[in-house]
Each structure stands twice: as C-alpha cells, then as structure tokens.
Amino acid sequence: MALRVFEGFDMLNSGTTLAQMQNRGWANITAGVTNNSINLAGRFGGKAMTGGNQDLVRFDVAALATAGVMGSAHFLLTNVPAAGTPWRIMEFTDGATCQLGLGVTNARQLCVYRGTTATVIATGTTALLSNNWTYLEFKAVIHNTSGTYEVRINGSSTPELVATGQNTRTTANNQLTGFQWIVGSGSGNTGHDDIYALDTTGAAPFTDYLGEVRVQTLAPSGAGSSTQWTPLSSTNVSNVDDTLLSNPFDQDATYNSSSTAGQIDLFAVQDLSGTPTVYAVAVSWDARKDDAGARSVRAKLKSGATTGNGPTKTMNSSYTSYQDVFLTDPNTAAAWTGAAVNAIEAGYENI
C-alpha cells in the first residue's frame, strides 16, 4: 500500500495516551506530544498535533529503497529559531536516525539538512508566514551519490527547493524506514495538521504528491442498517457520537457492548464539507474488553450494497484506539467519490 499513513489528529485530547497513538501505527512518540495535544486548534477546526520542545512522532515502515513523500500543514509561531539553529519540521529516518530533514531557519525560510540541522545543504527563499498554517510537501530519494530532494509549498507545482545527484543519507544504508514529524520549539508550540506519507510504490494517485490535502473527521450522525449491540443507555448512536471536534472521548460514560459473535453496529456519518477529491477513507474507533478471554472486533464500512471489512483486532482490557484505511470504495472497487462517502455507514463487528 503506497499510502502509508494519514491523520487529522482530531482524536487528540487531554486523555490521549502514547499507547493509544502507538496502536494506530505511531512508533516513536515523545510525551510532550500527548501532554500538549490540545494546545493548538486545527487549521479548519478540530485539533492539531503539537508539543513542547522538539517532540517527535514517527511512523515506521519496512525499509524502502524508493522515494518517499511527506505532506503536512505546518504552523509557525511569531517566535523563530536562533540564527544558525534551524527548527526541525519533517524527516525521513533510518531507524531512529534522520537521513534527510526539512527545517525552518531564523529568517522563516525552509532548509534541507542531512542528519542534523548542523548540516544544512540547501536553503529556500520564501519566508513562511508567522501565526499561520503553511502546507509543506517533502520528497526524497535516500542515496549517498544519486539522492534527490524536492520541497513544495501550499500545493504549488513549482519547487521551493530541488536537487538531484546528492548525498541524502546519514547512515550506511540507502533506505528510509520511517516518516517523522517534529513539533514544538524552545519558546513556544508549533504544530502539524492534515498529514500524509507515501512510499511512491503501487498505483496512482499514491505515487507522487497529493497536493494540499485536508483530513476531515466525520462523526456518527444516526442509526444505520444494523443495530445489534446493547447500548448502556439511550440509543446506540448516542453512545458513540463523541466527536472529538467538540467533546473528549468519554470512555465508560457512554458505550455499546456485545457478547455475541457476529453482532454488528452500523451508523450513518456526517457529510463531507464541500466537494473534495477523496483519496481514502478510514474508520477509527476505541474499544476494550470487560472480561477474561480473547475478544476481537473489526471495522465495517458499508457502501451501497457492499460492506467492506477491516482486519480482525484483538482487544485489550483498557481502551485502545484502532484505525483501518479503505483506499477504494467497497461497492465499486474504484476511487471514492464525495457522494459515496456521504452515503456510507461505518461501524464495527464483534468477532
């Protein structure tokens, strides 16, 4: 799968734990990300990922010899780094080591560095706006002699920085194994929202830049075609409509439960804002088991007459965040349309 991760961070709140983020695929996370996760509003509402002082989140993948692409809306405060000491923004890593990174300088200009910000190999000319969101995309091939990099701003097809025939590696390996985002500065929070990462393999459109994208979080809005789990109180949909755009996830205050394999809950969801191009749909939910023995659950996504299934997840005794990505419409096996997304039913099944 060429689309490795996308996230709008609307699930972040004061109760978000490192374990919950790790179960969604995030590997290396410093505590400041979750401790400060509600300190920054998202660029179109909702939440954004932020932190205290150069906090890290990394999404690990199997070693890639091909190019990688990272996209993110980056928020830069009025304060800027000291001269000669750029702040890190995004990095391609090999294990925990940065191979090639994108940073911002004291003049609010983007720079590409190898390994650490002490080795800046190129600096752009555009000054990023203070107290504003700027959408950044960073593409690179990691190689000691034929490496390449390219940086784009706000979806422009004209690169801010571009070069070929470069040494873009820090380790002894011509590869990347992780996509890493950095938040926070020594004197104030910076942040990321609406991120994505590609490995540039597979089929279009996930082989190159997606351009300036937005991750929309759609909460359950009504009962769907199956309501089989037992609500704690009221209705099934009222127990799972904790949209984190307004209310933190309330855990055992409201929930639906089932002890019968095969039972399914499906829900209508909110409509998309506008008429965007849709690259993928993800079903996200939180669940736990409340008794001994193995318990499993999986995501359900109904489109038209077809219901797609996510992989089976083994539940833990404490709440865990899950997410399954559907790259194509289960009903057509083709790319999603906005109309199809607006008509879906999303939910879960007791396995």
Image (cartoon, rainbow, N blue to C red):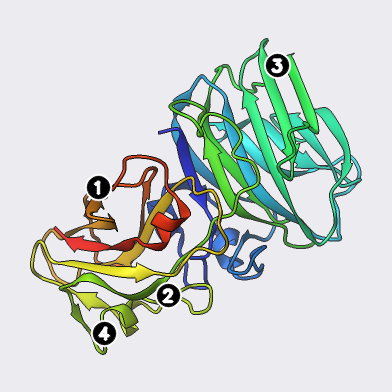
Left or right? Give the position of 156 relative to 199. right
* Between 108 and 210, the one nearer to me in the picture: 210
Amino acid type, mark 3? Asn
Q: Which residue is mark 3?
A: 167
Judging depth in this view, the residue of 276 and 57 nearest the camera is 276
CA gap, disc 2 and disc 4:
17 Å
Confirm or deny contact between disc 2 and disc 1 (CB under 8 A).
no
Whole-percent x and y of residue 345? Answer: 31, 63
Determine whether 30 is above or below 232 in the image: above
Residue 58 at x, y percent in the picture = 53, 44
Which of label 4 and label 3 is nearer to you? 4
Disc 1 residue type (three-letter): Pro
Instruction: Say what amino acid the circle numbered 2 marks.
Output: Phe
- Helix, strand or loop at label 4? It is loop
| Number of the label disc, if any, that sits on residue 311 | 1
Real-space Cα distance between discs 2 and 1?
23 Å
User: For this view, does 327 lie left or right of residue 42?
Assistant: left
For marks 4 and 3, the one nearer the N-term is 3
How crowded pointer 2 is (Cα within 10 Å; few <14, some 14-19, many 20+) is rated as: many
Task: Say which of marks 2 and 1 sits in front.
Answer: 1
Please give the name of the residue rendered at 91% of the width and 44% of the height, measured from the top-left corner.
83
Residue 249 — which label?
2
Q: Nearer the viewer, mark 2 or mark 4?
A: 4
Element at badge 2?
loop
Q: Is residue 73 visible?
A: yes
Chain-order first, disc 1 or disc 3: 3
